[in-house]
Image (cartoon, rainbow, N blue to C red):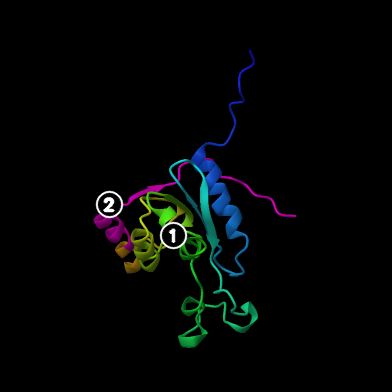
Amino acid sequence: MEEHRKDYLKWDEYFMGMAKLSSLRSKDPSTQVGSCIVDTEHKVVSIGYNGMPRGVDDEKVPWGHGEGLLSKYLYVCHAEFNAILNTRDGSRLNGCTLYVTLFPCNECAKAIVQVGIKEVVYMEDFHGDQVIYQASRKIFEMAGVKVRHYEGKDILIKVQ
C-alpha cells in the first residue's frame, strides 16, 4: 500500500494561504490585508480584504495617509470586517476561527467578539505598540477569544 504525500498543506497553512490570496484583491497601495473565516468543520464561511465599501468608487476616495478627509482610514473597510459582513448568515460565525494576514484593530476586535468568533490566527503584527492594537488584545482576552501567531509555512503566491 502506497503512503500519502508528506508535503501537503496543514489546515492553518491552507486557510492562511486563502487569506493571503484574498489580500491580493486590495487596491490599497501600502497595505494589503486578507482574511478567511472557517467553521469547526474546516469549511470556509467567508473571506474578505481591505477595500472601500460596496458602491463607493475606488477612484474617488483617497488611498494615502493624509489628514482629515484625505485619510484612507476614514473610508476603508478592514479585511476582517468585510469577511464578517460578507457572510450570508451571521449566526454561522459563532465558534469560528478567523485567519488574517495582519493583527486586527480594536474596531475589528469588537466585531469579531460580537459575532462569536472564538479564535484569531494572525500572520503579522506591525503595529502592536499602538494603543488600538493593545486594546484589541485586551478585548480578546476579556471575551475569551484565543489569539495565536501563525507558525506555518510561508505560502508563496505568484501572480503573473
Identify the residue at the far right of this view: 160
Is 159 in the magenta? yes
Residue 105 visible in the current orientation: yes
Q: Is residue 93 above or below residue 56?
A: above
Give residue 153's position: percent from left, percent from top. Answer: 54, 40
Tell me the residue that label 1 is attached to: 90
Sequence order check, earlier mark of 1 and 2: 1
Q: Is residue 4 above or below residue 9?
A: above
Mark 2 secondary-structure assignment: loop
- Measure the alpha-carbon separation of dots 1 and 2: 19 Å
Is 31 in the magenta? no
Label for residue 144?
2
Give residue 160's position: percent from left, percent from top. Answer: 75, 55
The residue at the point 41 percent across, 56 percent down is 91
Which of the 4 image quarters holds residue 126? bottom left
Nearer to me, 135 or 77: 77
